[in-house]
Image: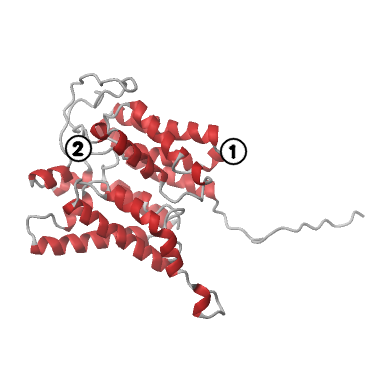
Amino acid sequence: MENPRFELTASPHIKGPDSTPRIMWSVVGSLAPVIFAAIWYFGPSAVFVIAAATLGCVLTERVFGPGGSLKDGSAVITGLLLGLTLPAGIPLWMAFLGGIFAIGLGKLIFGGLGQNVFNPALLGRAFLQAAFPEALTTWPNVSGPWWALRGDNFALPFMSANPVATVTGATPLGLMKFEGTHTELAKLIIGSTGGSLGETAAVMILLGGAYLALKKYLDWRIPISIFLTVAVLSQIIHVFMPEEPGALFMLFSGGLMLGAVFMATDMVTSPTAPKGAWIYGGGIGVLVVVIRLWGGLPEGVMYAILLMNSLVPFINRATQPRLFGTGKEAAA
């Protein structure tokens, strides 16, 4: 009879069914309705832009990331989210370059998955905003033939784009900030307005977020605290300054829904404690309102999340619950 084999392994010895790849690919699945809505409104250009951003992320992860890291799905999520933050008419090489930056300098330079300080997709978008501000603020309208390109997507790198017969215009936030014009609420909710690819169909975004919250793949406190803060603060300002937009416009315009549900809730760059989640979300909400109303740009979601990402280590330290059986000193 053979001697029994004993294996010594580190805890935990009983593991749940969820894993990093399972969570990541579930997020990818929850983004499918949002991507479908973007394609519905912006046609083939949406497919090309999202694909180019995702390709940049995946290739960078494959070349410079650790072996097998593509299987966890994090690079795909970064590419999809980056693509959804871009206008439909952006040249594809810019979207591809943004994907390289998002993974290379937004994730791998910090040590890979779980080590990054900032949301990689938003960092890639911030890079493109700084490097190519004109391309990042040219917003095609949703009108026109579905199959028509919404811009010169196939422009050569660092060459002037060719004129394309497409109609561009301001986003609802731009119209509000610079012209004092308010967009119909129904159009904001269904997403039939100019803007980024992900500024579409708030209902689709909320359904995806609800699914992830039920699966406990995101902390529901973060989007709820963002929405509550934006709604309450903007409505209070609207009461005293009627020319400023109210709660519903602020909630359903711009990239707030996409940012609050899919980016602010990133497990790596958001707080770990429930109290910290409320503080983090509230801070994002305040910054969004302040930047939108009094900043130089009509949108503030990207900068609000990145700024609060930088404060997450301090929020975690301040809100870390004390260990069982220890005094308050142990939590500090």
Between 187 and 106, the residue placed more toward the observer is 106
How far across and down, in percent of the image, does residue 280 sit? 35, 61
Q: Which of the two residues, 62 or 22, is positioned nearer the viewer here?
A: 62
Which of 55/2 is in front?
Answer: 55
Residue 196: x %, y % from top left: 26, 39
- Tell me if residue 248 comes above or below residue 239 in the rendering: above
Q: Residue at x 30, y 62 (%)?
A: 282
What residue is shown with label 2?
Answer: 194
Q: Would residue 329 be seen by someone viewing this image from the given angle? A: yes
Rendered location of residue 57, percent (x, y)? 45, 35
Which element is circle 1 on?
loop
Q: Quadrant of residue 99?
A: top left
- Work out which quarter of the rendered image holds the N terminus and state it: bottom right
- In the rendered structure, the answer to whether residue 201 lies left or right of residue 112 reads left
Res. 206 in view: no
Q: Which residue is at the front of the view, 233 or 45?
A: 233
Q: Which mark is residue 68?
A: 1
Residue drawn 10% across and 47% down? 182
Give the image quarter of residue 89.
Answer: top left
User: Label 1 is placed on what type of residue?
Assistant: Gly
Q: Residue at x 30, y 41 (%)?
A: 198
